[in-house]
Image: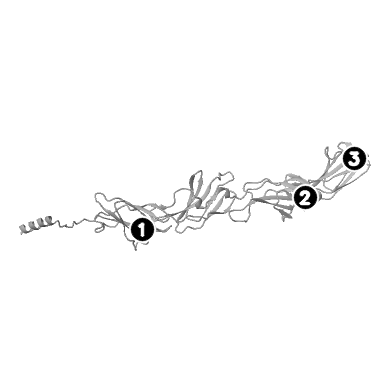
Amino acid sequence: MKRLISLAIVLVLMLGIAVPVAYAAPAQVTDVHQSEAGETSVTIAWNAILGQSVRYYVELSDDKTNWSDDYGFETDQDIFIPGLVAGHTYYARVRASQDYGKTFGAWSEVTELVTIPKEVKDVVQKSATTNSAKFSWSASAGATGYRFCEWVNDQEYVVATTSKTSYTLKKLSNKTAFDRSIYVRPIRKSTTGYVAEKAASYSWSYDGVSSYDVKLVPKKMATPKITSYLSNIGVIYYDLTSVPFQKGVKVAFYKHNGKKAVKTTNDTWRADGLKRNVFYKVKAAAYTTVGTSTKAKYGAWSAYNYFCLGTETHTTSTRSKITARWNKVNGATNYTVYIAKDSNKGWKKVKTVKNNALKITKFGKAKLKSKSLYYVKVVANKKVGKKTYKSGGNEEVSIYTK
């Protein structure tokens, strides 16, 4: 019997008949993890099985139930898988074989994979205050969050990560270095902690918001300053000090004690249709518009300035006396009467009175001279708190004594 077995072995060797070799199943693949992500691709990697010449096989699923055909390849310890959906979650598992797919080791643990959501391309400013700006954008399908970024001097700064589709920048001012661009990068985070997102780099495809387009609500304006009066036609000219982010202004005029505006204008230097013998008050506010909205966003109103276009003065005279009369001014506290020998200079105060008539007998300390030319004007005064406002464009009346 032993002789027959020996002869059989010799015959096998002489004829070259192959005898199958039985391979043991390889060890289980470990540490399967995502190493890179794109919008339509992922790269996964794992630990190599040491001491064995194996080939790795990968299967993909989006529900952990239905798996794709094997992605089979040689001895690399990672694989790039294209053709996926942006902002989506997949699952992968890996196993090894030493005999080209006839005998396999156990599947690795299933790992979660995520792709990058599609870019956000509609970031807009939605609202503003004097020191903050709110931005919003449309949701990107599959995004679990968003990086709100600023790109400054070729460097990205992630201001915040939020799950919302809006973010408010705070503590802004006109002195804030607005030489920057604002944009949003969507992300998708897996349960393993891996975050699928684009690398930090600015691209105009992000449709970012230039800082020059960021608007804040203008701050409180300075009180309008009246610069000249055309009393005979009811016109005043005024100066406004502009403020940062000002796109336009609204100027409102009221009677001195009124709450309802008698006139509003967007003019920045002139107002007409005003009357003599009335004290008015005026205030101004600057406004801007935000994003694509045409609605004006107003800053705080300035403090009031009070003014009057003066009153009409009438005079009569004798050899040693001039009598001045004038129309009462609505809102005046009192009136100051002045006299001069030259309408361009040398005005002297006569007296401040509450009624609307005054007899003048002196020019300074000297008595009036007969057959002499004098000029008279009346200034209406209004006291508001501790401040006194005086009428402008006051009429000067010339008269000879008899």
The secondary element bearing badge 3 is classed as: strand
> From the viewer's perspective, is the residue at label 3 or at label 2 nearer?
2
> In this orientation, which residue lies closer to the viewer: 266 or 253?
266
Q: Front-most of 18 and 232?
A: 18
> Mark 1 to mark 2: distance in Å?
78 Å
For the residue carrying disc 2, how many other residues have a C-alpha within 10 Å: few (<14), some (14-19), or many (20+)? Answer: some
Query: To which residue does mark 1 refer?
Result: 91
Residue found at x 38% / y 56%: 82
Residue 190 position within the rendered picture, expressed as x and y whole percent measured from the top left = 40, 55
Is residue 93 at all visible to an observer of this figure?
yes
- 324 left or right, relative to 246: right
Query: Front-most of 125 and 100?
Result: 100
Q: CA distance from mark 1 to mark 3?
A: 105 Å
Label 1: element kind: strand
Q: Is residue 71 above or below residue 237?
A: below
Residue 150 position within the rendered picture, expressed as x and y whole percent measured from the top left: 51, 48
Q: Residue furthest front?
A: 15
Sequence order check, earlier mark of 1 and 2: 1
Query: Sequence order check: which comes first, mark 1 or mark 3?
Result: 1
Q: Which mark is residue 235?
A: 2
Whole-percent x, y for residue 58 in the image? 32, 57
Alpha carbon distance from label 3 to label 2:
30 Å
- Label 3 is placed on what type of residue? Leu
Which quarter of the image is occupied by the C terminus? top right
Numbered badge on residue 373: 3
Element under disc 2 = strand
The first of marks 3 and 2 along the sequence is: 2
- Tell me the kind of residue under disc 1: Tyr
Relative horizontal placement of residue 15, taking residue 294 as reference (left or right): left
Give the image's coloring scheme.
Answer: one colour
